[in-house]
Image: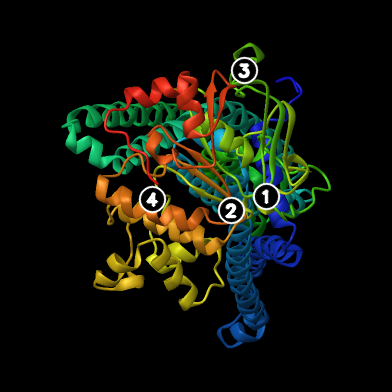
Amino acid sequence: MTDAKRPSTTRRTLHYFWEVTRSQPGMFVLAVLSSVGYVVFLTYLNTWLMGLVVDRVAAGGVTADQVFVVFGPYVLWLVVVNVVGQLCSKLQDYSCWKLEIQANHDLATNAFDTLCNQSMTFHANRFGGSLVSQTSKFLNSYSSLMDTFTYMVLPTVASVVFTIVSLAFSVPLYVVILSVFLVVYSVVTYRMYRRILPINAEAAGAQNALSGELSDSVTNILSVKTYGREDYEQGLFERANERVVETGSKRMRQSIVTGATTSSLIVVIMAVAVVFIVGGNAWFGVTAGTLVMMFQYTYSLTMRFNMLSSTMQRLNAAFGDAADMTRILDEPRLVADAPGARPLEVRDGAIDFEHLNFWYSDADESSKVFDDFSLHIPAGQHVGLVGRSGAGKTTLTKLLLRLSDIQEGEILIDGQDVSACTQQSLRRQIAYVPQEALLFHRSIRENIAYGRPDATEADIVRAAREANALEFIEQLPQGFDTLVGERGIKLSGGQRQRVAIARALLADCPVLLLDEATSALDSESERLVQDALVNLMRGRTSIVVAHRLSTVAALDRIVVLDGGHVAEDGTHAELLAEGGEYAGLWGRQTGAFLEA
Protein backbone atom coordinates (compact mmCIF):
# COMPACT_ATOMS: atom_id res chain seq x y z
CA MET A 1 0.00 0.00 0.00
CA THR A 2 1.38 3.39 -0.98
CA ASP A 3 1.73 6.19 1.54
CA ALA A 4 -1.02 8.11 -0.25
CA LYS A 5 -3.49 5.23 0.20
CA ARG A 6 -2.38 4.18 3.70
CA PRO A 7 -4.78 5.30 6.46
CA SER A 8 -3.34 7.98 8.73
CA THR A 9 -1.93 6.93 12.06
CA THR A 10 -4.55 9.10 13.79
CA ARG A 11 -7.41 7.28 12.07
CA ARG A 12 -5.86 3.92 12.89
CA THR A 13 -5.47 4.95 16.53
CA LEU A 14 -9.14 5.95 16.61
CA HIS A 15 -9.99 2.58 15.08
CA TYR A 16 -8.25 0.67 17.87
CA PHE A 17 -9.75 2.90 20.55
CA TRP A 18 -13.26 2.65 19.11
CA GLU A 19 -13.02 -1.16 18.94
CA VAL A 20 -12.49 -1.41 22.69
CA THR A 21 -15.05 1.33 23.44
CA ARG A 22 -17.91 -0.21 21.50
CA SER A 23 -17.46 -3.44 23.44
CA GLN A 24 -19.11 -1.52 26.32
CA PRO A 25 -22.08 0.16 24.57
CA GLY A 26 -24.04 0.69 27.78
CA MET A 27 -21.21 2.54 29.52
CA PHE A 28 -20.49 4.62 26.42
CA VAL A 29 -24.13 5.71 26.08
CA LEU A 30 -24.25 6.50 29.80
CA ALA A 31 -21.09 8.61 29.45
CA VAL A 32 -22.64 10.59 26.58
CA LEU A 33 -26.02 11.12 28.25
CA SER A 34 -24.58 12.03 31.64
CA SER A 35 -22.11 14.49 30.07
CA VAL A 36 -24.89 16.23 28.14
CA GLY A 37 -27.19 16.10 31.16
CA TYR A 38 -24.54 17.68 33.37
CA VAL A 39 -24.29 20.69 31.02
CA VAL A 40 -28.02 21.00 30.43
CA PHE A 41 -29.05 20.93 34.07
CA LEU A 42 -26.23 22.81 35.79
CA THR A 43 -25.48 25.39 33.11
CA TYR A 44 -28.63 25.93 31.05
CA LEU A 45 -31.64 25.04 33.17
CA ASN A 46 -30.09 26.72 36.22
CA THR A 47 -29.52 29.92 34.25
CA TRP A 48 -32.92 29.72 32.54
CA LEU A 49 -34.68 29.46 35.91
CA MET A 50 -32.65 32.39 37.24
CA GLY A 51 -33.68 34.38 34.16
CA LEU A 52 -37.31 33.70 35.00
CA VAL A 53 -36.68 34.84 38.60
CA VAL A 54 -35.07 38.08 37.36
CA ASP A 55 -38.02 38.78 35.05
CA ARG A 56 -40.46 38.11 37.87
CA VAL A 57 -38.51 40.41 40.21
CA ALA A 58 -38.45 43.10 37.51
CA ALA A 59 -42.22 42.82 37.16
CA GLY A 60 -42.54 43.86 40.86
CA GLY A 61 -45.65 43.53 42.99
CA VAL A 62 -44.28 40.89 45.37
CA THR A 63 -44.71 41.72 49.04
CA ALA A 64 -42.65 40.23 51.85
CA ASP A 65 -45.30 37.77 52.84
CA GLN A 66 -45.65 36.54 49.25
CA VAL A 67 -41.96 35.78 48.58
CA PHE A 68 -42.19 32.05 49.24
CA VAL A 69 -45.60 31.80 47.63
CA VAL A 70 -44.38 33.44 44.40
CA PHE A 71 -40.79 32.21 44.31
CA GLY A 72 -41.22 28.89 46.13
CA PRO A 73 -41.76 26.89 42.92
CA TYR A 74 -38.63 28.48 41.39
CA VAL A 75 -36.58 27.50 44.45
CA LEU A 76 -37.96 23.96 44.33
CA TRP A 77 -37.16 23.60 40.65
CA LEU A 78 -33.67 24.99 41.19
CA VAL A 79 -33.06 22.38 43.88
CA VAL A 80 -34.35 19.59 41.62
CA VAL A 81 -32.24 20.80 38.69
CA ASN A 82 -29.10 20.93 40.82
CA VAL A 83 -29.69 17.50 42.33
CA VAL A 84 -30.19 15.94 38.89
CA GLY A 85 -27.17 17.85 37.55
CA GLN A 86 -24.95 16.57 40.34
CA LEU A 87 -26.24 13.05 39.78
CA CYS A 88 -25.31 13.39 36.10
CA SER A 89 -21.85 14.55 37.19
CA LYS A 90 -21.31 11.43 39.30
CA LEU A 91 -22.65 9.14 36.55
CA GLN A 92 -20.27 10.88 34.17
CA ASP A 93 -17.32 10.04 36.43
CA TYR A 94 -18.52 6.46 36.93
CA SER A 95 -19.12 5.64 33.27
CA CYS A 96 -15.86 7.25 32.11
CA TRP A 97 -13.89 5.39 34.76
CA LYS A 98 -15.50 2.03 33.92
CA LEU A 99 -14.84 2.57 30.22
CA GLU A 100 -11.18 3.34 30.83
CA ILE A 101 -10.59 0.37 33.15
CA GLN A 102 -11.98 -2.21 30.71
CA ALA A 103 -10.58 -0.51 27.60
CA ASN A 104 -7.09 -0.35 29.10
CA HIS A 105 -7.36 -4.06 29.90
CA ASP A 106 -8.31 -4.86 26.29
CA LEU A 107 -5.71 -2.54 24.77
CA ALA A 108 -2.97 -3.92 27.01
CA THR A 109 -3.95 -7.46 26.01
CA ASN A 110 -3.88 -6.51 22.33
CA ALA A 111 -0.48 -4.80 22.64
CA PHE A 112 1.01 -7.68 24.64
CA ASP A 113 -0.31 -10.29 22.21
CA THR A 114 1.10 -8.31 19.28
CA LEU A 115 4.54 -7.97 20.86
CA CYS A 116 4.65 -11.62 21.93
CA ASN A 117 3.67 -12.86 18.49
CA GLN A 118 6.01 -10.66 16.49
CA SER A 119 9.15 -12.20 15.01
CA MET A 120 12.59 -12.11 16.58
CA THR A 121 13.66 -9.86 13.69
CA PHE A 122 11.09 -7.33 14.89
CA HIS A 123 12.42 -7.45 18.47
CA ALA A 124 16.07 -7.43 17.39
CA ASN A 125 15.53 -4.04 15.75
CA ARG A 126 13.93 -2.37 18.78
CA PHE A 127 14.75 -1.44 22.36
CA GLY A 128 12.78 -3.44 24.91
CA GLY A 129 12.50 -0.31 27.07
CA SER A 130 11.01 1.66 24.17
CA LEU A 131 8.37 -1.01 23.58
CA VAL A 132 7.38 -0.86 27.25
CA SER A 133 7.23 2.95 27.08
CA GLN A 134 5.18 2.87 23.87
CA THR A 135 2.70 0.42 25.38
CA SER A 136 2.29 2.54 28.51
CA LYS A 137 1.77 5.70 26.45
CA PHE A 138 -0.74 3.92 24.23
CA LEU A 139 -2.87 3.00 27.25
CA ASN A 140 -2.53 6.46 28.79
CA SER A 141 -3.55 8.00 25.46
CA TYR A 142 -6.89 6.20 25.56
CA SER A 143 -7.57 7.49 29.06
CA SER A 144 -6.57 11.00 28.01
CA LEU A 145 -8.80 10.90 24.92
CA MET A 146 -11.77 9.50 26.84
CA ASP A 147 -11.41 12.14 29.56
CA THR A 148 -11.13 14.86 26.91
CA PHE A 149 -14.16 13.54 25.02
CA THR A 150 -16.30 13.15 28.14
CA TYR A 151 -15.34 16.28 30.07
CA MET A 152 -14.49 18.72 27.27
CA VAL A 153 -15.72 17.79 23.79
CA LEU A 154 -19.23 16.58 24.66
CA PRO A 155 -19.98 19.48 27.06
CA THR A 156 -18.72 21.98 24.45
CA VAL A 157 -20.91 20.53 21.68
CA ALA A 158 -23.90 20.44 24.05
CA SER A 159 -23.22 24.07 25.03
CA VAL A 160 -23.24 25.20 21.40
CA VAL A 161 -26.50 23.40 20.64
CA PHE A 162 -28.34 24.61 23.72
CA THR A 163 -27.07 28.20 23.44
CA ILE A 164 -28.36 28.43 19.87
CA VAL A 165 -31.67 26.74 20.70
CA SER A 166 -32.24 28.83 23.83
CA LEU A 167 -31.55 32.23 22.23
CA ALA A 168 -32.59 31.68 18.59
CA PHE A 169 -36.15 32.98 19.00
CA SER A 170 -35.51 35.88 21.40
CA VAL A 171 -32.32 37.33 19.80
CA PRO A 172 -31.84 35.67 16.36
CA LEU A 173 -29.34 38.27 15.07
CA TYR A 174 -27.14 37.72 18.09
CA VAL A 175 -27.26 33.95 17.55
CA VAL A 176 -26.22 34.33 13.89
CA ILE A 177 -23.27 36.60 14.75
CA LEU A 178 -22.20 34.36 17.65
CA SER A 179 -22.38 31.27 15.40
CA VAL A 180 -20.15 32.93 12.79
CA PHE A 181 -17.54 33.77 15.42
CA LEU A 182 -17.66 30.24 16.84
CA VAL A 183 -17.13 28.73 13.38
CA VAL A 184 -14.18 31.07 12.74
CA TYR A 185 -12.74 30.20 16.14
CA SER A 186 -13.09 26.44 15.49
CA VAL A 187 -11.51 26.61 12.03
CA VAL A 188 -8.58 28.70 13.24
CA THR A 189 -7.97 26.40 16.22
CA TYR A 190 -8.18 23.26 14.08
CA ARG A 191 -5.78 24.57 11.45
CA MET A 192 -3.25 25.75 14.02
CA TYR A 193 -3.30 22.52 15.98
CA ARG A 194 -2.91 20.40 12.87
CA ARG A 195 0.54 21.94 12.66
CA ILE A 196 1.27 20.74 16.19
CA LEU A 197 0.32 17.09 15.55
CA PRO A 198 3.63 16.09 13.88
CA ILE A 199 5.50 18.03 16.58
CA ASN A 200 3.69 15.98 19.25
CA ALA A 201 4.59 12.75 17.44
CA GLU A 202 8.19 13.92 17.25
CA ALA A 203 8.20 14.70 20.98
CA ALA A 204 6.73 11.28 21.78
CA GLY A 205 9.37 9.60 19.62
CA ALA A 206 12.12 11.49 21.43
CA GLN A 207 10.71 10.36 24.77
CA ASN A 208 10.59 6.74 23.59
CA ALA A 209 14.19 6.98 22.42
CA LEU A 210 15.18 8.31 25.84
CA SER A 211 13.42 5.36 27.52
CA GLY A 212 15.19 2.96 25.18
CA GLU A 213 18.59 4.51 25.91
CA LEU A 214 17.96 4.27 29.65
CA SER A 215 16.82 0.66 29.35
CA ASP A 216 19.81 -0.30 27.20
CA SER A 217 22.31 1.19 29.65
CA VAL A 218 20.64 -0.26 32.75
CA THR A 219 20.27 -3.71 31.16
CA ASN A 220 23.99 -3.76 30.30
CA ILE A 221 25.15 -1.99 33.47
CA LEU A 222 27.83 -4.63 34.13
CA SER A 223 29.50 -3.85 30.79
CA VAL A 224 29.20 -0.13 31.47
CA LYS A 225 30.94 -0.43 34.82
CA THR A 226 33.60 -3.00 33.94
CA TYR A 227 34.72 -0.94 30.93
CA GLY A 228 34.50 2.36 32.79
CA ARG A 229 32.09 3.78 30.22
CA GLU A 230 29.76 5.63 32.57
CA ASP A 231 30.73 8.96 30.97
CA TYR A 232 30.08 7.63 27.48
CA GLU A 233 26.65 6.27 28.41
CA GLN A 234 25.86 9.50 30.21
CA GLY A 235 26.74 11.36 27.00
CA LEU A 236 24.37 9.18 24.95
CA PHE A 237 21.63 9.68 27.53
CA GLU A 238 22.23 13.42 27.66
CA ARG A 239 21.93 13.73 23.88
CA ALA A 240 18.67 11.80 23.96
CA ASN A 241 17.50 13.94 26.88
CA GLU A 242 18.40 17.12 25.03
CA ARG A 243 16.30 15.91 22.11
CA VAL A 244 13.36 15.51 24.49
CA VAL A 245 13.88 19.08 25.73
CA GLU A 246 14.21 20.36 22.16
CA THR A 247 11.01 18.73 20.89
CA GLY A 248 9.14 19.61 24.10
CA SER A 249 10.17 23.26 23.79
CA LYS A 250 9.13 23.30 20.15
CA ARG A 251 5.72 21.93 21.11
CA MET A 252 5.43 24.48 23.92
CA ARG A 253 6.21 27.45 21.66
CA GLN A 254 3.70 26.40 19.02
CA SER A 255 1.05 25.77 21.68
CA ILE A 256 1.57 29.19 23.25
CA VAL A 257 1.22 30.93 19.87
CA THR A 258 -1.97 29.01 19.18
CA GLY A 259 -3.32 29.73 22.65
CA ALA A 260 -2.66 33.47 22.29
CA THR A 261 -4.47 33.55 18.94
CA THR A 262 -7.53 31.70 20.20
CA SER A 263 -7.66 33.79 23.40
CA SER A 264 -7.79 36.94 21.27
CA LEU A 265 -10.82 35.56 19.44
CA ILE A 266 -12.51 34.84 22.79
CA VAL A 267 -12.02 38.49 23.80
CA VAL A 268 -13.67 39.61 20.55
CA ILE A 269 -16.63 37.27 21.09
CA MET A 270 -17.17 38.56 24.65
CA ALA A 271 -16.93 42.15 23.43
CA VAL A 272 -19.69 41.52 20.89
CA ALA A 273 -21.77 39.83 23.60
CA VAL A 274 -21.43 42.81 25.94
CA VAL A 275 -22.50 45.22 23.17
CA PHE A 276 -25.64 43.18 22.54
CA ILE A 277 -26.37 42.86 26.24
CA VAL A 278 -26.10 46.58 27.05
CA GLY A 279 -28.21 47.50 24.01
CA GLY A 280 -30.48 44.50 23.95
CA ASN A 281 -33.35 46.08 25.82
CA ALA A 282 -33.21 49.41 23.96
CA TRP A 283 -32.73 47.93 20.47
CA PHE A 284 -34.71 44.70 20.59
CA GLY A 285 -36.84 44.94 23.75
CA VAL A 286 -35.08 42.00 25.34
CA THR A 287 -36.13 41.39 28.94
CA ALA A 288 -33.69 41.58 31.85
CA GLY A 289 -33.95 37.83 32.43
CA THR A 290 -33.07 37.10 28.82
CA LEU A 291 -30.10 39.46 29.04
CA VAL A 292 -28.87 37.49 32.05
CA MET A 293 -29.28 34.29 30.05
CA MET A 294 -27.42 35.81 27.05
CA PHE A 295 -24.46 36.78 29.20
CA GLN A 296 -24.30 33.58 31.20
CA TYR A 297 -24.73 31.30 28.19
CA THR A 298 -22.16 33.21 26.14
CA TYR A 299 -19.70 33.37 29.01
CA SER A 300 -20.07 29.64 29.69
CA LEU A 301 -19.70 28.89 25.99
CA THR A 302 -16.60 31.04 25.57
CA MET A 303 -15.00 29.45 28.62
CA ARG A 304 -15.55 26.06 27.05
CA PHE A 305 -14.19 27.28 23.71
CA ASN A 306 -11.29 28.83 25.57
CA MET A 307 -10.53 25.29 26.76
CA LEU A 308 -10.74 24.15 23.14
CA SER A 309 -7.09 25.15 22.82
CA SER A 310 -6.07 22.90 25.68
CA THR A 311 -8.49 20.27 24.38
CA MET A 312 -6.80 20.20 20.99
CA GLN A 313 -3.43 20.16 22.71
CA ARG A 314 -4.43 17.15 24.79
CA LEU A 315 -5.86 15.41 21.73
CA ASN A 316 -2.71 16.04 19.74
CA ALA A 317 -0.48 14.91 22.59
CA ALA A 318 -2.56 11.75 23.01
CA PHE A 319 -2.44 10.89 19.32
CA GLY A 320 1.28 11.63 19.24
CA ASP A 321 1.91 9.36 22.22
CA ALA A 322 -0.19 6.56 20.69
CA ALA A 323 1.37 6.80 17.22
CA ASP A 324 4.32 4.43 17.73
CA MET A 325 2.25 1.60 19.20
CA THR A 326 -0.44 2.09 16.55
CA ARG A 327 2.19 1.55 13.86
CA ILE A 328 3.36 -1.57 15.68
CA LEU A 329 -0.20 -2.94 15.88
CA ASP A 330 -0.58 -2.25 12.15
CA GLU A 331 2.75 -3.84 11.27
CA PRO A 332 2.34 -7.21 9.56
CA ARG A 333 3.81 -10.20 11.33
CA LEU A 334 6.95 -11.42 9.59
CA VAL A 335 6.20 -14.90 10.90
CA ALA A 336 2.51 -15.80 11.09
CA ASP A 337 0.49 -18.98 11.32
CA ALA A 338 -0.98 -20.04 7.99
CA PRO A 339 -4.79 -20.01 7.72
CA GLY A 340 -6.03 -23.31 9.07
CA ALA A 341 -2.65 -24.17 10.62
CA ARG A 342 -2.85 -27.43 12.54
CA PRO A 343 -0.96 -28.57 15.65
CA LEU A 344 2.34 -30.37 15.10
CA GLU A 345 2.32 -33.98 16.24
CA VAL A 346 5.81 -35.43 16.79
CA ARG A 347 6.06 -39.20 17.00
CA ASP A 348 9.73 -39.93 16.29
CA GLY A 349 11.49 -36.60 15.75
CA ALA A 350 12.99 -36.99 12.26
CA ILE A 351 14.00 -33.60 10.81
CA ASP A 352 14.42 -32.68 7.14
CA PHE A 353 15.65 -29.43 5.65
CA GLU A 354 14.75 -29.63 1.95
CA HIS A 355 16.07 -27.18 -0.66
CA LEU A 356 16.10 -24.21 1.70
CA ASN A 357 16.59 -20.70 0.35
CA PHE A 358 16.76 -18.01 2.99
CA TRP A 359 17.88 -14.42 3.26
CA TYR A 360 17.14 -11.86 5.98
CA SER A 361 14.18 -9.52 5.53
CA ASP A 362 16.42 -6.45 5.53
CA ALA A 363 18.70 -7.92 2.83
CA ASP A 364 18.11 -8.87 -0.80
CA GLU A 365 18.04 -12.25 -2.48
CA SER A 366 21.64 -11.96 -3.57
CA SER A 367 22.69 -12.12 0.12
CA LYS A 368 21.38 -15.62 0.73
CA VAL A 369 22.34 -17.32 3.99
CA PHE A 370 21.18 -20.68 2.60
CA ASP A 371 21.02 -21.54 -1.09
CA ASP A 372 19.28 -24.83 -1.97
CA PHE A 373 20.31 -26.27 1.42
CA SER A 374 19.24 -29.82 2.31
CA LEU A 375 19.95 -31.95 5.39
CA HIS A 376 18.31 -35.07 6.82
CA ILE A 377 18.50 -35.88 10.56
CA PRO A 378 17.03 -39.29 11.49
CA ALA A 379 14.87 -39.61 14.59
CA GLY A 380 16.87 -39.85 17.81
CA GLN A 381 20.19 -38.89 16.23
CA HIS A 382 22.56 -36.47 18.00
CA VAL A 383 24.03 -34.06 15.45
CA GLY A 384 26.66 -31.40 15.95
CA LEU A 385 26.67 -28.27 13.78
CA VAL A 386 30.10 -26.69 13.51
CA GLY A 387 31.84 -24.21 11.24
CA ARG A 388 33.30 -20.75 11.17
CA SER A 389 31.36 -17.78 12.48
CA GLY A 390 28.68 -16.74 10.00
CA ALA A 391 28.38 -20.21 8.47
CA GLY A 392 24.66 -20.34 9.35
CA LYS A 393 24.64 -22.67 12.36
CA THR A 394 22.47 -20.59 14.72
CA THR A 395 20.34 -19.34 11.83
CA LEU A 396 19.45 -22.95 10.96
CA THR A 397 18.19 -23.62 14.49
CA LYS A 398 16.10 -20.42 14.43
CA LEU A 399 14.57 -21.44 11.11
CA LEU A 400 13.63 -24.78 12.66
CA LEU A 401 11.93 -22.88 15.50
CA ARG A 402 10.31 -20.54 12.93
CA LEU A 403 11.74 -17.48 14.61
CA SER A 404 12.26 -16.48 10.98
CA ASP A 405 10.60 -17.91 7.88
CA ILE A 406 12.35 -19.32 4.85
CA GLN A 407 11.56 -17.89 1.43
CA GLU A 408 11.74 -21.22 -0.44
CA GLY A 409 11.92 -24.89 0.45
CA GLU A 410 10.53 -26.92 3.34
CA ILE A 411 11.41 -27.82 6.90
CA LEU A 412 9.78 -31.06 7.98
CA ILE A 413 9.45 -32.81 11.33
CA ASP A 414 8.17 -36.34 10.94
CA GLY A 415 7.08 -35.37 7.43
CA GLN A 416 5.03 -32.37 8.60
CA ASP A 417 5.84 -28.98 7.11
CA VAL A 418 6.45 -26.70 10.09
CA SER A 419 5.11 -23.69 8.14
CA ALA A 420 1.72 -25.40 8.01
CA CYS A 421 1.66 -26.00 11.78
CA THR A 422 0.92 -23.56 14.57
CA GLN A 423 4.01 -21.88 15.98
CA GLN A 424 3.08 -22.67 19.58
CA SER A 425 2.68 -26.40 18.90
CA LEU A 426 6.01 -26.42 17.03
CA ARG A 427 7.95 -24.76 19.83
CA ARG A 428 6.32 -26.90 22.50
CA GLN A 429 7.89 -29.91 20.78
CA ILE A 430 11.38 -28.41 20.78
CA ALA A 431 13.47 -27.71 23.89
CA TYR A 432 15.88 -24.85 23.23
CA VAL A 433 18.93 -24.12 25.38
CA PRO A 434 20.88 -21.07 24.14
CA GLN A 435 24.35 -19.87 25.03
CA GLU A 436 22.95 -17.36 27.50
CA ALA A 437 20.27 -18.96 29.65
CA LEU A 438 16.97 -17.10 29.37
CA LEU A 439 15.70 -16.76 32.93
CA PHE A 440 12.88 -14.62 34.30
CA HIS A 441 13.07 -12.50 37.44
CA ARG A 442 11.06 -15.16 39.24
CA SER A 443 11.79 -18.05 41.57
CA ILE A 444 14.01 -20.95 40.51
CA ARG A 445 10.93 -23.19 40.79
CA GLU A 446 8.97 -21.03 38.33
CA ASN A 447 11.90 -20.89 35.92
CA ILE A 448 12.35 -24.66 35.88
CA ALA A 449 8.62 -25.30 35.49
CA TYR A 450 8.18 -22.64 32.79
CA GLY A 451 7.81 -25.14 29.96
CA ARG A 452 5.50 -27.37 32.04
CA PRO A 453 3.60 -25.27 34.59
CA ASP A 454 1.55 -28.24 35.82
CA ALA A 455 4.67 -30.12 36.98
CA THR A 456 4.67 -31.48 40.51
CA GLU A 457 7.28 -30.59 43.10
CA ALA A 458 8.77 -34.06 42.69
CA ASP A 459 9.07 -33.52 38.93
CA ILE A 460 10.85 -30.19 39.46
CA VAL A 461 13.27 -31.66 41.97
CA ARG A 462 14.03 -34.62 39.69
CA ALA A 463 14.72 -32.30 36.74
CA ALA A 464 17.04 -30.20 38.91
CA ARG A 465 18.90 -33.32 40.05
CA GLU A 466 19.37 -34.61 36.49
CA ALA A 467 20.61 -31.16 35.45
CA ASN A 468 23.21 -31.18 38.27
CA ALA A 469 21.47 -28.14 39.72
CA LEU A 470 19.90 -29.57 42.88
CA GLU A 471 23.02 -29.25 45.03
CA PHE A 472 23.53 -25.53 44.53
CA ILE A 473 19.77 -24.84 44.72
CA GLU A 474 19.48 -26.53 48.13
CA GLN A 475 22.41 -24.45 49.41
CA LEU A 476 20.58 -21.20 48.65
CA PRO A 477 18.85 -19.61 51.68
CA GLN A 478 15.40 -19.92 50.08
CA GLY A 479 16.08 -22.95 47.91
CA PHE A 480 13.65 -23.30 45.01
CA ASP A 481 11.89 -20.10 46.13
CA THR A 482 15.00 -17.99 45.46
CA LEU A 483 14.38 -15.12 43.05
CA VAL A 484 17.08 -15.21 40.38
CA GLY A 485 17.05 -11.49 39.43
CA GLU A 486 16.58 -9.97 36.01
CA ARG A 487 17.85 -12.44 33.37
CA GLY A 488 19.11 -14.60 36.29
CA ILE A 489 21.82 -12.14 37.29
CA LYS A 490 21.97 -13.47 40.88
CA LEU A 491 23.24 -16.84 39.64
CA SER A 492 26.57 -17.71 38.06
CA GLY A 493 26.75 -18.60 34.37
CA GLY A 494 26.99 -22.32 35.11
CA GLN A 495 24.09 -22.17 37.56
CA ARG A 496 21.89 -20.31 35.08
CA GLN A 497 22.70 -22.85 32.40
CA ARG A 498 21.85 -25.78 34.64
CA VAL A 499 18.52 -24.20 35.56
CA ALA A 500 17.83 -23.80 31.82
CA ILE A 501 18.74 -27.46 31.25
CA ALA A 502 16.44 -28.50 34.11
CA ARG A 503 13.67 -26.54 32.39
CA ALA A 504 14.35 -28.39 29.13
CA LEU A 505 14.44 -31.75 30.93
CA LEU A 506 11.10 -31.06 32.59
CA ALA A 507 9.51 -29.93 29.32
CA ASP A 508 10.38 -33.41 27.94
CA CYS A 509 10.29 -32.38 24.27
CA PRO A 510 11.16 -34.94 21.56
CA VAL A 511 13.52 -32.49 19.80
CA LEU A 512 16.39 -30.65 21.46
CA LEU A 513 18.37 -27.62 20.25
CA LEU A 514 21.56 -26.63 22.06
CA ASP A 515 23.14 -23.41 20.81
CA GLU A 516 26.63 -22.94 22.30
CA ALA A 517 25.29 -24.18 25.62
CA THR A 518 28.74 -24.57 27.23
CA SER A 519 30.95 -22.09 25.38
CA ALA A 520 30.92 -19.39 28.07
CA LEU A 521 31.58 -21.64 31.07
CA ASP A 522 34.63 -22.44 33.14
CA SER A 523 35.96 -26.00 33.13
CA GLU A 524 34.16 -27.13 36.30
CA SER A 525 30.85 -25.63 35.24
CA GLU A 526 31.30 -27.08 31.75
CA ARG A 527 31.80 -30.56 33.17
CA LEU A 528 28.63 -30.30 35.27
CA VAL A 529 26.66 -28.88 32.37
CA GLN A 530 27.93 -31.48 29.90
CA ASP A 531 26.99 -34.26 32.31
CA ALA A 532 23.53 -32.70 32.47
CA LEU A 533 23.38 -32.47 28.68
CA VAL A 534 24.05 -36.21 28.40
CA ASN A 535 20.89 -36.78 30.45
CA LEU A 536 19.01 -34.19 28.43
CA MET A 537 19.88 -35.61 24.99
CA ARG A 538 19.06 -39.20 25.90
CA GLY A 539 16.23 -40.44 23.66
CA ARG A 540 15.81 -37.11 21.86
CA THR A 541 16.66 -35.92 18.38
CA SER A 542 19.35 -33.35 19.21
CA ILE A 543 21.05 -30.59 17.28
CA VAL A 544 24.10 -29.15 19.04
CA VAL A 545 25.67 -25.92 17.77
CA ALA A 546 29.24 -25.49 19.01
CA HIS A 547 32.46 -23.66 18.36
CA ARG A 548 34.21 -25.75 21.03
CA LEU A 549 34.56 -29.01 19.14
CA SER A 550 35.08 -31.11 22.27
CA THR A 551 31.35 -30.51 22.92
CA VAL A 552 30.32 -32.39 19.76
CA ALA A 553 33.15 -34.88 19.27
CA ALA A 554 31.27 -37.74 20.92
CA LEU A 555 27.99 -37.14 19.07
CA ASP A 556 26.56 -39.56 16.50
CA ARG A 557 27.31 -37.22 13.64
CA ILE A 558 28.96 -33.87 12.90
CA VAL A 559 27.88 -31.54 10.07
CA VAL A 560 30.32 -28.83 9.02
CA LEU A 561 28.65 -25.75 7.52
CA ASP A 562 30.45 -23.33 5.27
CA GLY A 563 28.72 -20.41 3.56
CA GLY A 564 25.29 -21.91 4.14
CA HIS A 565 26.20 -25.29 2.61
CA VAL A 566 27.11 -28.69 4.04
CA ALA A 567 30.88 -28.82 3.61
CA GLU A 568 31.48 -32.10 5.48
CA ASP A 569 29.29 -34.71 7.16
CA GLY A 570 30.38 -37.67 9.29
CA THR A 571 31.56 -38.83 12.71
CA HIS A 572 34.44 -37.21 14.56
CA ALA A 573 36.84 -39.99 13.52
CA GLU A 574 35.71 -39.92 9.89
CA LEU A 575 36.12 -36.17 9.59
CA LEU A 576 39.57 -36.22 11.17
CA ALA A 577 40.60 -38.94 8.75
CA GLU A 578 39.41 -36.84 5.80
CA GLY A 579 41.78 -34.04 6.82
CA GLY A 580 39.39 -31.35 5.64
CA GLU A 581 37.77 -28.30 7.25
CA TYR A 582 36.84 -30.10 10.48
CA ALA A 583 40.30 -31.55 10.93
CA GLY A 584 41.75 -28.07 10.46
CA LEU A 585 39.40 -26.59 13.05
CA TRP A 586 40.20 -29.42 15.48
CA GLY A 587 43.92 -28.95 15.04
CA ARG A 588 43.69 -25.20 15.75
CA GLN A 589 41.86 -25.74 19.04
CA THR A 590 44.69 -26.28 21.48
CA GLY A 591 43.77 -28.29 24.53
CA ALA A 592 40.82 -29.93 22.77
CA PHE A 593 39.93 -33.36 24.03
CA LEU A 594 37.64 -36.19 23.09
CA GLU A 595 35.15 -37.22 25.71
CA ALA A 596 34.28 -40.88 25.78
Helix, strand or loop status at disc 4: helix
Q: Nearer the viewer, mark 3 or mark 4?
A: 4
Helix, strand or loop status at disc 1: loop
Say whether marks 1 and 3 touch (CB < 8 Å): no
Image position of 463 with respect to 9: above or below: below
Which quadrant holds residue 594? top left
Report the colour scheme. Answer: rainbow
Can you name the residue that lies furthest to the top here?
Answer: 366
Dot 1 or dot 3: first in sequence order is 1
Q: Residue at x 47, y 46 (%)?
A: 132
Dot 4 or dot 1: first in sequence order is 1
Dot 3 or dot 4: first in sequence order is 3
Dot 3 or dot 2: first in sequence order is 3
Helix, strand or loop status at disc 2: loop
Per the rendering, the mark at residue 540 is 2
Q: Position of residue 312 (x, y in %)?
A: 56, 39
The CA span between labels 4 and 1 is: 22 Å
**Residue highlighted by disc 1:** 349
Q: Is residue 539 left or right of residue 515?
A: right
Instruction: Specify few, some or many for label 2: CA neighbours under 10 Å numbering under 14, 14-19, or 20 or more.
Output: many
**Residue highlighted by disc 3:** 368
Q: Residue at x 51, y 23 (%)?
A: 391
Dot 4 or dot 2: first in sequence order is 4
**Residue highlighted by disc 4:** 530
Say whether marks 1 and 2 touch (CB < 8 Å): yes
Instruction: Specify few, some or many for label 3: CA neighbours under 10 Å numbering under 14, 14-19, or 20 or more.
Output: some
Amino acid marked by disc 1? Gly
The image quadrant where one finds the N terminus is top right
